Image (spheres, grey):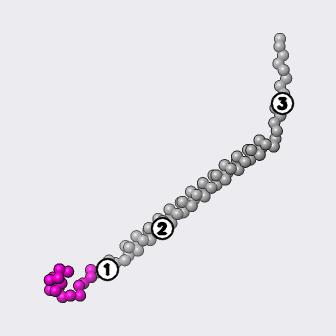
Amino acid sequence: MRRRPLLRPVVRPRGAPLLRGALVGGAAYAAGRSSARAARREQDQEEAIADLQAQQQQQSAAAPSPAPAQSPLPPAKAKLLGI
């Protein structure tokens, strides 16, 4: 019967893989944070545009339409001139 050789415990250097993991994790965190900020900025901008459009619609609805301009000429002369 053959005996299996005893397995040695795996020894890993601690510094480099730990730093690499921290670097990858930090980069992912920064990227996520940046995209969240960009999304929030875009959402705020869209809300501001919607608010301005609503204000413009309210102002245009509240403003009365101007009366048609009258010609300073008497109606007979305006008819002759084609105004």
User: First in sequence: mark 3 or mark 2?
Assistant: 3
User: First in sequence: mark 3 or mark 1?
Assistant: 3
In the picture of the structure, the residue carrying the numbered disc 3 is: 9
Badge 2 marks a residue whose secondary structure is helix
Mark 2: give few (<14), some (14-19) or many (20+) Cα within 10 Å.
Answer: few
User: First in sequence: mark 1 or mark 2?
Assistant: 2
The span shown in magenta is 68-83
Q: What residue is shown at x 14% (from left), y 83% (from top)?
A: 80
Residue 19, image x, y percentages: 77, 46
Q: Which mark is residue 51?
A: 2
Give the Cα distance between marks 3 and 2: 66 Å
In front here: 23 or 46? 23
Mark 3: give few (<14), some (14-19) or many (20+) Cα within 10 Å.
Answer: few
In the picture of the structure, the residue carrying the numbered disc 1 is: 66
Does the stretch in magenta take in 81?
Answer: yes
Q: Residue furthest top?
A: 1
Residue 44, image x, y percentages: 54, 63
Badge 3 marks a residue whose secondary structure is loop
